[in-house]
Amino acid sequence: MEKKNIDWGNLGFGYVQTDYRYVSDFKDGSWDEGRLTKDANVVINECAGVLQYAQTVFEGMKAYTTEDGRIVTFRPDLNAERMENSAKRLEMPVFPKDRFVQAVIDTVKANAAYVPPYGSGATLYIRPYMFGSNPVIGVKPADEYQFRVFTTPVGPYFKGGIKPLTICVSDFDRAAPHGTGHIKAGLNYAMSLHAIMEAHRNGYDENMYLDAATRTKVEETGGANFLFITKDNKVVTPKSGSILPSITRRSLVYVAEHYLGLEVEEREVYFDEVKDFAECGLCGTAAVISPVGKIVNHGQEICFPSGMDEMGPVTRKLYDTLTGIQMGRIEAPEGWIQEIK
């Protein structure tokens, strides 16, 4: 199979239209059989539920070319489960887990020429999403929905190498207790846009959100979970009912315990103790782990011993091990790798 004529090494992290996408419609209480289409446009009514009341959920994942030339994707069953939970919370119909995984496989397979070659640093980003498609003017759930999957080749999240980030403690709240912070809904990301642009305007790479109830505990950023390393190499991740359960974070926790023999603790993390950690990272699909070198809280700086030049040693081991599993250099736990045949 001949690859597309793309300068893989210079791809950015942006949208490049590929040949096929998957579409399935929900109408009269059931999903249709679904199909692949070359049409990249979505045509909906001006009063569609997604446009009026933001009834939309999505997922993000990647397909890779492994060292031995296979095309694979990483733990798509967990993305299917998370979308199921997101859909239920927004009163949307569940797209069946087995059909979700098959839709991802079919879409990647149809766009195999866009999967970047091994060693290029690039990957094929996969975006499954669902939205209310019929006209809704009263505040209520839509009656009809569309589930879609598109793909786009993307370059490495960090062009020119991984450099630690400087982040700030946000004055905004990301999610309320008992709200929607634990699901991957478009509305959560819409409300984060002003906060992240404010952070950028003030010279910071990202925000640290604290819990809305007490503003004493670490939650997450606008699009990634936190991961901390203690001075005695224990891995600590914040526990909260209002943060998104990151698949990357859950995978890193498993890698820490079962591959690296590290102690792991998932618990409430108070901001007052952040200064005592040796390393800090943000974990998510796009970058796997983004190291954090400095956190600024209204002028007060917390500088991690790992510094501003490179990943800390434990964070680096976690990153190298998980990316090694994803790229086929290290044997994966059973069920983690879905090969696209």
Image (tube, rainbow, N blue to C red):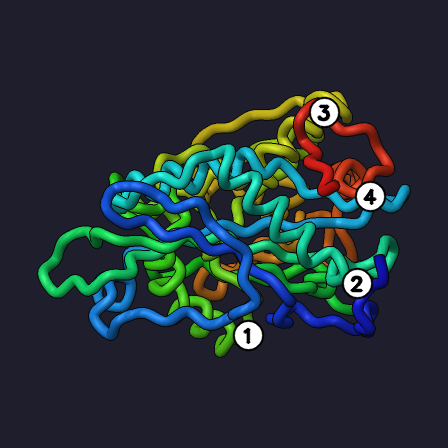
Q: Are marks 3 and 1 in contact (CB under 8 Å)?
A: no
Who comes first in sequence, dot 3 or dot 4?
Answer: 4
Kindly identify the residue that appears in the image at 40 percent across and 60 percent down: 189
Under mark 2, the amino acid is Gly
Tell me how far mark 1 sits from mark 2, CA to CA.
20 Å
Tell me how far mark 3 sits from mark 1, CA to CA.
40 Å
Q: Which residue is mark 2?
A: 161
Figure check: 231 above or below 170: above
Kindly identify the residue that appears in the image at 28 percent across and 49 percent down: 27
Under mark 4, the amino acid is Arg
Q: Residue lying farthest bottom?
A: 201
Who comes first in sequence, dot 3 or dot 1?
Answer: 1
- Mark toward the viewer: 2 or 3: 3
Under mark 3, the amino acid is Pro
Tell me how far mark 2 sits from mark 4, CA to CA.
25 Å
Q: Secondary structure at mark 4?
A: loop
- Mark toward the viewer: 3 or 1: 3
- Mark toward the viewer: 2 or 4: 4
Instruction: Give coordinates of residue 318: x percent, y percent.
Output: 74, 38
Figure check: 158 above or below 232: below
Q: Is residue 315 visible?
A: no
Which quadrant would residue 287 be assigned to in this image? bottom right
Q: Secondary structure at mark 3?
A: loop
Q: Secondary structure at mark 2?
A: loop
Q: Residues within 10 Å of mark 4 (few under 14, many from 20)?
A: some
Tell me how far mark 1 sits from mark 4, CA to CA.
41 Å
Q: Which residue is mark 4?
A: 70
Report whether 248 appears left or right of 154.
left
Q: Which residue is mark 3?
A: 333
